């Protein structure tokens, strides 16, 4: 079952990161911050197995299929490559970078989960070793989502304050 707090965290943390990065890199627009949010849920595409079981695809295509690699850098890299090819050439690099930012934040957050939840083969296809770190929280802990909401609100307020400061300091044009 999908945990709402976990999903919310995986969307809000990339938003906060992209928003803060937009202060330094003006090419990261609000729309592109949304792309980072999408990247934050890419590793969870492995949950498509609940909708389309691997057996169904195997019976149609006649080849063995697994959704599990979607929750690894290899699986996500393939999705990012495909997704970045679906946008205009001028946006491809930005889309790829921000999808990767979101996916990377997802992996970092998942690595902090209490094992065995944090024992995916994140580095597949480089290695099939399972990374295990001492967990700090479970995916059902609500406080993580609260921290993510606070981070997102702080990033939004910071960006808004900067935007207002830039508007205030820009020269006024009088047309007429």
Image: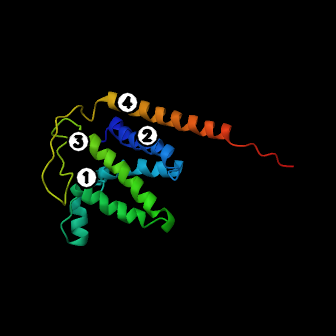
Dot 4 falls on a residue whose secondary structure is: helix
Q: Nearer the viewer, residue 117 or 165?
A: 165
How many C-alpha atoms fall within 10 Å of the one at disc 3: few (<14), some, or many (≥20)? many
Q: Residues within 10 Å of mark 4 (few under 14, many from 20)?
A: some
Counting residues from the N terminus, which is met first, the one under dot 3 or under dot 1?
1
Circle 2 sits in a helix, a strand or a loop, which is it? helix
Sooner in the amino-acid sequence: mark 3 or mark 2: 2
Q: Earlier in the sequence, mark 2 or mark 1?
A: 2
Badges 4 and 3: C-beta atoms under 8 Å apart? no
In the picture, measured across the screen, residue 96 lies left or right of residue 65, that is right
Mark 2, residue position: 16
- Image quadrant occupied by the N terminus: top left
Spatial separation of the CA atoms under disc 3 and disc 1: 12 Å
Foreground mark, 1 or 4, reads: 4
- Using the rendered view, name the quadrant where residue 144 is placed: top left
Residue nearest the observer in this picture, 14 or 120: 14
Structural crowding at the residue carrying mark 1, measured as other residues with C-alpha within 10 Å and reported as few (<14), some (14–19) or many (≥20):
many
Q: Could you tell me if the residues under marks 2 and 1 are in contact, i.e. CB atoms within 8 Å? A: no
Which residue is tagged 3? 111
Q: Which residue is mark 1?
A: 71
Q: Which mark is residue 176?
A: none
Rendering coords of residue 91 (x, y %): 49, 62
Residue 171, visible in the rendered structure = yes
Q: Residues within 10 Å of mark 2 (few under 14, many from 20)?
A: many
Sequence-earlier tag: 2 or 4: 2
Inter-mark Cα distance, 3 to 2: 19 Å
Residue shown at 19% from the left, 57% from the top: 124
Per the model, the C-alpha gap separating discs 4 and 3 is: 17 Å
Cα–Cα span, label 2 and label 1: 22 Å
Camera-side mark, 2 or 1:
2
Residue 147: mark in rendering: 4
């Amino acid at each position: 079952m999908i945990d709402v707090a976990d999903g919310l965290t995986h969307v809000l943390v990339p938003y906060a990161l992209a928003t803060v990065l937009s202060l330094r890199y003006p090419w990261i627009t609000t729309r592109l911050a949304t792309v980072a949010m999408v990247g934050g849920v890419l590793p969870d595409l492995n949950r498509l197995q609940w909708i389309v079981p691997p057996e169904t695809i195997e019976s149609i295509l006649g080849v063995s299929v697994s959704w599990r690699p979607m929750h690894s850098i290899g699986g996500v890299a393939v999705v990012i490559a495909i997704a970045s090819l679906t946008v205009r050439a001028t946006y491809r690099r930005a889309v790829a970078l921000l999808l990767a930012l979101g996916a990377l934040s997802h992996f970092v957050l998942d690595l902090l989960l209490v094992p065995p939840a944090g024992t995916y083969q994140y580095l597949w296809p480089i290695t099939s070793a399972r990374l295990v770190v001492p967990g700090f929280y479970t995916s059902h802990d609500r406080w993580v989502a609260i921290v993510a909401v606070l981070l997102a609100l702080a990033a939004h307020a910071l960006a808004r304050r900067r935007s207002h400061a830039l508007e205030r300091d820009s020269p006024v044009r009088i047309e007429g």
